[in-house]
Amino acid sequence: MRTRRAARSRYILFLVIISLLVTACGKTATVLPLPVPTLTPTRYSTPWLQVYFTDPDAPYAHDYEGGPDEFLAEAIDRARLSVDVAAYSLNLWSIRDALIHAFQRGVTVRMVMESDNLDDQEVQDLIGTGIPIVDDQQEGLMHDKFVVIDHSEVWTGSMNYTVSGAYKDNNNLICLRSTQVAEDYTSEFEEMFDDHLFGPSSVANTPNPKITIDGTPVEVLYSPEDSVAARLLELIDGAQESIYFMAYSFTSNEIGNAIVERAQAGITIAGVLDNGQINSNQGTEYDAFLQAGLDVRQDGNTEGLMHHKVLIIDRQIVVTGSYNFTASAEENNDENVVIIFDPDVAATYLEEFQHIYSLAEP
């Protein structure tokens, strides 16, 4: 532990020295008035919510240990009744081992997965142990990444349960401790696992779409059935001060146009998009954003993907989950979205945004 802390301290000192050298050379860069992030796995913690971010540049990431997956694995190790997993892909041995151990000690373990990703050895290990896995068998993607433990806590976010997802890509992972949120996610899970309803065949039946946890409003939505884009447009149109976004894939003209309109109304806009998706996607909104004069950048992650799907509105509202800002996410895939109305949570995500933004290129 001391060695890891020392390594992180050296890393932070290195960043400070580089910053001073750049300044001395007379180069300037746009710096948003946001806090400088601390490079720690856990960024925010309350009795009901924990927020984790991956950090591909951290020394521990190169050893594939100490990432957010280990917190999820520990939570699975504590399970006493049930673990339900909806995973687009899975090859993390930490999650595989935790699920196998839970199953072997009598915990009910069930999974749904994207059909295209069943061949990974870790998934075959789960199947070989006897854990039941239902795959979507449809053209759209089973793109969810969530775990429900003991009907009382939900883990979700943008992070796939893969080595690259936890250690090479920029991702967020959150844990919500709420029986009502767990009921929402269990309902969605069982729709897939028991009823084999995926994508466009899904039905809108979320028991608690809007709840309040310890004074914090929280919304839970699923795609395609809950018209996620319409809700995001409402939030964007209602922005009064700022919109920051981190987007792996952004091809939605509707959402893109709404952001441009808010910029034209004087709202501060800044965003970072994944470099690879900008170069490979047809119809990316990146070009439209540039033409409109928005402050958008291509990410600087040279090891993996900038895989967040995050909106931060007015430093008060955070949108996160598996939902890319695309027509496929809206119409064909199985996706989940959480909206949290809390300035402290927003400040935590703004720290992550500033970190990603500082490494990105115009």
Image: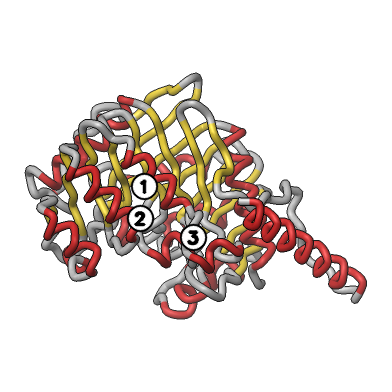
SS at mark 2?
helix
Which mark lies nearer to you, 1 or 3?
Answer: 1
Give the residue type that dot 2 points to. Ser
Q: Earlier in the sequence, mark 3 or mark 2?
A: 2
Q: Is any part of residue 291 visible from this angle?
A: no
Q: Amino acid at mark 1?
A: Ala
- The picture places residue 226, in percent across and down from the top left corner, at 28, 42
Residue 204 image offset from top left, x and y in percent: 20, 38
The extreme left residue here reads: 195
Residue with the mark numbered 2 = 94
How far separated are the C-alphas under marks 3 and 2? Answer: 27 Å
Pick whichever, 190 or 47, lies toward us.
47
145 shown above or below 174: below
Q: Amino acid at mark 3?
A: Ala
Helix, strand or loop under label 1? helix
Q: Which residue is mark 3?
A: 247
Q: Which quarter of the picture shows residue 190?
A: top left
**Circles 2 and 1: CB atoms closer than 8 Å:** yes
Return the mark for residue 73: 1
Quadrant containing the C terminus is bottom right
Packing grade of label 3 (10 A; few <14, some 14-19, many >=20) is many
Going from the N terminus, do you reach mark 1 or mark 3 first? Answer: 1
Q: Callout 1 environment at 10 Å: few (<14), some (14 to 19), or many (20+)?
A: some
